[in-house]
Amino acid sequence: MTTFRCGYVGIFGRPNVGKSTFLNQVLGEKIAIVTAKAQTTRNRIVGIKNREHEQLILVDTPGIHRPRGSLNEALMDCTMAVLRDVDVSLFLFGADQKSLSPGEKDLLEILVREQRDFVPVLNKADLVDCPVAELPLSRQLGEFLPGHEGIVRPISALTGEGIEPLVEDLCRFLPESPPLFPRDATTEISERFWVQEVVREKIFQLTRHEVPYSTTTLIDYFHDRETRLSIGVTIFVEHPSQKGIIIGRQGRMLKAIGTAARKEIEALVGIPVFLELWVSVEKNWTKNPAALERFGYR
């Protein structure tokens, strides 16, 4: 009888290295929001990859950094909690990186010191035209991680290159266990949370500077009927000036955010969506522990 394996795989790496793109590529569908801006992911996002003899529970995490401020501290607390809970860690680096960041070194030292299983992976390998072993980062990893030299897996999370062999490698680290989720499941996140994230993604895509980093979202109502989904979402900002930017001249920015989010939600649920957005000021919420808890970051 063939043994079944099931376990948790943590996805770690610096901001904007491609963790969420990797998760979506492995699953073959979008469950994690993706933008060109760093630090888009703020929560642990769980995706489930079902194979004939394995179930991989993949956990996307906020980007590794040395935190400054209450929100960033909460994000790193989330990352460290995942690190200590998973069966194996997938550590993503960028092929365009010149060196390891202080935050990356901190996490690697923990993995080595605590003798945790981890797999170093070089993402964006399609962007370089030399052997992986010749990249400056590969040489630095070899010096920093004795015994791991030469086994950094090159992949492209964007194109899918190298993904399947990597998944095969990860399966070897999973413990023998029956599946922990239904065999047709792809995520444990709720539809409500996903809607909040889609609205936040559009804010990241359509606004600039500090504005997207000062916003968060909460569902006000969620009415799911057979023929239409009605949703109300409040966008919270830190300062009145940011509220004006989110709303835009004659409400154009808020309308653009709502239209883009509604179209993506409709594509997922397959029925018309009525999406209502409001903007509210929660002064300095990123520095307020009570607000961070209210918004689900603690």
Image: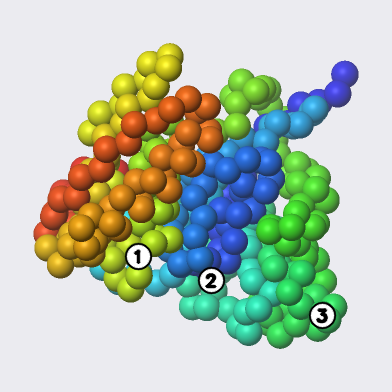
The type of residue carrying mark 3 is Asp
The quadrant of the rendering that contains the N terminus is: top right
- Of tags 3 and 2, the one toward the viewer is 3
The type of residue carrying mark 2 is Glu
> Which residue lies most toward the right here?
1
The type of residue carrying mark 1 is Thr
Residue at the spot of label 2: 104
Graded by Cα atoms within 10 Å as few (under 14), some (14 to 19) or many (20 or more), the crowding at tag 2 reads: many
Front residue of 194 and 273: 273
Residue at the spot of label 1: 207
> Which residue lies most toward the front here?
250
Measured Cα–Cα span from mark 3 to mark 1:
34 Å
Front residue of 175 and 114: 175
Judged from the image, the secondary structure of the residue bearing numbered disc 3 is: loop
Q: Residue at x 30, y 58 (%)?
A: 253
Q: Residue at x 48, y 33 (%)?
A: 266
Q: Residue at x 63, y 40 (%)?
A: 29
Q: Quadrant of residue 96?
A: bottom right
Closer to the chain start, of discs 2 and 1, is 2
Where's residue 128, x and y in %?
A: 76, 78
Closer to the chain start, of discs 3 and 1, is 3
Closer to the chain start, of discs 3 and 2, is 2
130 relative to 289 in the view: left or right: right
Residue at the spot of label 3: 129
Determine if residue 288 is in view.
Answer: no
Measured Cα–Cα span from mark 3 to mark 2:
25 Å
**Considering only vertical position in the picture, is 24 above or below 214?**
above
Where's residue 4, x and y in %?
A: 76, 26
Where's residue 23, x and y in %?
A: 61, 48
Residue 221 numbered tag: none
Measured Cα–Cα span from mark 2 to mark 1:
29 Å
Q: Residue at x 46, y 67 (%)?
A: 38
